[in-house]
């Protein structure tokens, strides 16, 4: 069984090419694959399936079946889409530079750029209210944003590098019954943000693409602007985000770093 390993701004993924959607991808197998000691190690799994064979409607041929490292399913992964696109293009499975990827959050048109970066049309980033989160004893107010998946964006004057994000920050489970991705942000200047994230179903990661869109949408909302463009620095690198009424884009790098064969006995034992 073929696998690949890739990352987008160091948000890393195991890719499983499974065009006919035949794999029995259980939560236990996803968690084992993502485990950094007993598996390959990753923040999530990207199963590459044909939309028609997976039984979903899409204008595109390929559907990204995304799973978090704990085995849970999430609607969307912005960094994952870029890595998914890089795989399809390198494997000759998509004729670039423009095509569409199906996701649980809907179709996502993409453009592969000459410098190797990928731009994803991320759909609407919708402000859904406000809530709070607690990192240890410290409370943060935040703007709730839906980018297909849920986010709470908290701006702070304190350097986010100083936050201890080893444990799950507390959040309002009534407001976010399906859980939430938590972003902590410093405004560095006009159109320049710095972010750390604690991802639902994963923990702290070095980047979250939907999270970067959420923080630019929250900044735009707080500034009372119609649209916004911003560079967002995350521990794993830098992306560029635009947000406008009903639409947003995410541009950043994507890399495939390895490929190999999963051991059949290991796969069977981890079912
Ligand atoms: N890393 C992703 C987001 C993955 C899903 C998220 N953990 C969730 O559960 O919603 C990204 O790059 O957007």
Image (cartoon, grey):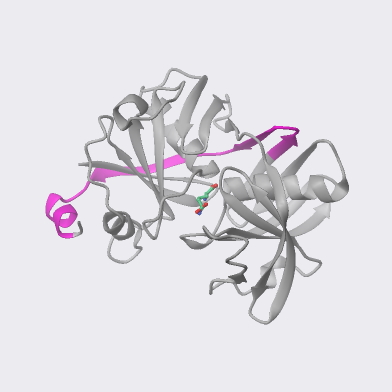
Q: Is residue 138 left or right of residue 262?
A: right
As drawn, 262 above or below 226: below
As drawn, 244 above or below 169: above
- What's the residue at 61%, 44% (across, down)? 147
Between 121 and 12, the residue placed more toward the observer is: 121
- What's the residue at 78%, 65% (across, down)? 156
Q: In this view, does 222 lie to the left or right of 152?
A: right
| Residue 99 screen position, x and y as percent | 50, 21
Residue 41 image-quadrant placement:
bottom left
- What's the residue at 33%, 30% (across, down)? 55
| Residue 106 screen position, x and y as percent | 51, 33
For the C terminus, the image quarter is: bottom left
Magenta part of the protein: which range?
A: 241-269
| Residue 67 screen position, x and y as percent | 40, 49
- What's the residue at 68%, 82% (across, down)? 137
As drawn, 175 above or below 215: below
Between 55 and 59, the residue placed more toward the observer is: 55
């Amino acid at each position: 069984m073929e696998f690949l390993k890739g990352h987008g701004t160091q948000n890393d993924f195991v890719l499983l090419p499974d065009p006919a959607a035949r794999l029995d991808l259980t939560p236990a197998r996803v968690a084992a694959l993502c485990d950094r000691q007993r598996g390959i190690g990753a923040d999530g799994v990207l199963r590459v399936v044909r939309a028609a064979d997976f039984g979903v409607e899409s204008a595109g041929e390929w559907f990204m079946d995304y799973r978090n490292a704990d085995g849970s399913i999430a609607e969307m992964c912005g960094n994952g889409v870029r890595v998914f696109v890089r795989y399809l293009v390198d494997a000759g499975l998509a004729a670039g530079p423009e095509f569409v990827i199906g996701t649980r959050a809907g179709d996502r048109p993409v453009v592969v750029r000459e410098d190797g970066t990928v731009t994803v049309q991320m759909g609407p980033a919708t402000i859904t209210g406000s809530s709070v989160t607690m990192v240890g004893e410290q409370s943060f107010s935040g703007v709730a944003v839906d980018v297909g998946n849920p986010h709470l964006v908290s701006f702070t004057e304190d350097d986010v590098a100083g936050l201890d994000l080893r444990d799950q920050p507390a959040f309002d489970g009534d407001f976010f019954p399906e859980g939430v991705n938590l972003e902590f942000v410093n405004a560095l200047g006009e159109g320049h943000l710095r972010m750390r994230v604690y991802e639902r179903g994963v923990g702290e990661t070095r980047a979250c693409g939907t999270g970067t869109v959420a923080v630019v949408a929250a900044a735009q909302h707080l500034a009372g602007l119609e649209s916004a463009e911003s560079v967002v620095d995350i521990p794993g690198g830098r992306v560029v985000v635009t947000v406008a009424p009903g639409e947003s884009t995410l541009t950043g790098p994507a890399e495939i770093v390895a490929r190999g064969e999963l051991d059949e006995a290991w796969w069977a034992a981890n079912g």
